[in-house]
Amino acid sequence: MGATGTVLKIEALYVEHSDWLCNWLRRRAFSREHAADLTHDTFRRLLERGPMVSPDDPRNYLVTIARRLLVDDVRRRNIERAVLDVVASHQQQIEHITPERITAAVMLLDSLMAILDGLPKPARTAFLLRTLEGLTQQDIADRMGISLRTVKRHIAMGLARCFALEEGPASL
């Protein structure tokens, strides 16, 4: 059967079942316009598939396609919502940047640099490999040629100094 036969079968399905499918979708899509769009997308998907055999249960066949479109639509909307939330959150963070916050951030970075400079070189290296590069402790031990226990001690030293900074400069 050629393309013309497929189009005729889909046209017959459309004439016979589109109103029913649109009503079925309206109960799930909560909008008459959205249900109509999904109904047309269902039949568009049939046309895109090409040659078609007549389904034994046309309504079940159409509902299966429409359900998949609904799921895809929900996923797309969830992704859009998540992206919009991230953008809104990022914009709020940017809007709350003040000269005082910039000064506080610079002071914090200066303090962190002083802490790192005050660590022995092996401890600083181990701490930075763990916190910035995300290496495992075993990977750090292998890279530096030291024991796993020593790596743990170095990282603990760096963390202790950072926690001391959180408590205030007097505890350093």
Image: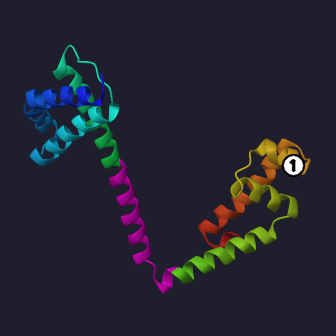
**Is residue 96 rendered magenta in the image?**
yes
Magenta region, residue range: 79-101
Q: Is residue 130 above or below residue 71?
A: below
Which image quarter holds the N terminus?
Answer: top left
Percent from the top left, x then y, of residue 46?
27, 32
**Which residue corresponds to the image point at 72% horizontal and 55% vertical from the top-left?**
133
Residue 23 on image: x %, y %: 8, 34
Above or below — where is 133 with respect to 93?
above
Quadrant where the C terminus lies?
bottom right
How would you rate the neighbour count of disc 1 (Cα within 10 Å): few for under 14, some for 14-19, many for 20 or more? few
Relative to residue 84, is residue 2 depicted above or below? above
Q: Viewer-proximal residue, 43 or 3?
A: 3
Q: Position of residue 102 (x, y in %)?
A: 54, 81
Q: Residue furthest bottom?
A: 99
Q: Quadrant of residue 121?
A: bottom right
Residue 24: percent from left, percent from top: 12, 31
The quarter holding residue 65 reads top left
Please tell me which residue lies in front, 70 or 5: 5
Colour treatment of the image:
rainbow
* Left or right position of 7 against 145: left
The verdict on residue 80 being magenta is yes
Query: What secondary structure is marked by label 1?
Result: helix
Q: Is residue 114 above or below residue 76?
A: below
Q: Main secondary structure of the magenta part?
A: helix
From the image, tell me which residue sits under label 1: 143
Closer to us: 133 or 64: 64
